[in-house]
Amino acid sequence: MRGARSVRIALAAAASTIIALTAIWRGVLNQQRNPAVSPHRVEIATIPNTPQAPGPAPAGMIWIPGGEFSMGTEDPTDMVCGGPDSMPDARPIHRVYVNGFWMDATEVTNDQFEQFVAATGYVTIAERKPSQADFPDAPPGNLVPGSVVFKPTVEPVPLNNHLQWWDYVPGANWRHPEGPASNIEQRGKYPVVQIAYADAEAFTEWAKKRLPTEAEWEFAARGGLSAKPYAWGDDLKPGGKWAANIYEGTFPVNDTGDDGFAGIAPVAQFAANGYGLFDVAGNVWEWCSDWYRPDYYQTLATAGGIARNPKGPNDSFDPSEPTIPKHVQRGGSFLCTDQYCTRYMVGTRGKGEPSTASNHLGFRCVKVSTGL
């Protein structure tokens, strides 16, 4: 984690060159497809458990029955609106079983996070001043709290370097998502962002919940559908209408807001999926508890049978940044587009360094029973 925070500090200097924004999640664009991973699509239906909930629903949560399903996605590059990324880390498609659980109907909102902070006095990672002891080579003037913010480019650029549209902004945090000049007034129902992994875990402990596993997240996001590319079915725009808050226009120059929102949106502005969950595609990325490895699905498939309640690998490895551990992120965000990133597709995966936040990253929670 030190390497990622060092990057943030280096970026804080006005005169510094943005040389390594390693902690920002971006998919495995431009990776070669792993020849050991089969793109074959497993056409086996989702088999949900008995849908009856074990008791009254906790406030704001939906019962997810659990069951057996096919996890992952086929290569989307040949699909209409499939994008340029073959997403080999989401294959092979494999069978998984998860127990039933409760899940937040929406991403955690600013109002909810504010209640947590008021009750606990918690200070997020983006609000903390980095320590000189942790970064002895950093100029003291660089040791300022802040976080990463999307910054549109002034004209179209090659999409091979995400440093062109991300910037470290001193003073950016959950209260000021785009920097000190921004705030969350009148945004209580927006998803809280600028949340590092530890921040999300602290909230879940206070709320007596936890983060979902990647398998739980995907089972819930599919809403009972089988082998569909989107949480709502086969088409990106069913009936010609946008079904999620993603990026329209020329990325990363101008989000036209054709879906109703240029940038982030309040929660629950689009139809819920089959289980009653909102915004499982687009709007903001969501942390999962699993460590990220691109070969994890291959490991499960090689083991054979049905993976039962998988919790992810024991450690993390990302070949694009081999020294930086990462957790899985799911769902895509308002910055996803078929020009660059189509990870709003339900079987796809994201990744992020645990101590890094951004203005398109939040979370939602699960719990296994009303007694927790």
Image (spheres, helix red, strand yellow):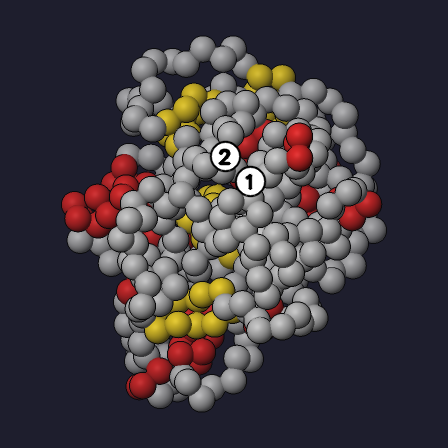
Which kind of residue does numbered mark 2 sit on?
Answer: Phe
| Neighbours of disc 1 within 10 Å: few (<14), some (14-19), many (20+) | many
Front residue (pair 110, 185):
185
| Rendered residue at 54%/51% (across/down) | 257
Residue 185 location, x and y as percent?
26, 53
- Left or right side of 307 for 6: left
The answer to which quarter of the image holds residue 129 is: bottom left
Residue 7 location, x and y as percent?
47, 75
| Rendered residue at 49%/64% (across/down) | 150
Q: Is residue 306 visible?
A: no
Of the 4 image quadrants, the one containing the C terminus is: top left
Mark 2, secondary structure of its residue: loop
Residue identifier under label 1: 244
Residue identifier under label 2: 270
Q: Is residue 248 visible?
A: yes
Q: Is residue 93 above or below residue 53?
A: below
- Left or right side of 168 for 230: right
Q: Is residue 263 above or below residue 6?
A: above
The alpha-carbon separation of the residues under discs 2 and 1 comes to: 6 Å
Pointer 2 and pointer 1: residues touching (CB < 8 Å)? yes
Front residue (pair 301, 220):
220
- Left or right side of 288 for 127: left
Which kind of residue does numbered mark 1 sit on?
Answer: Ala
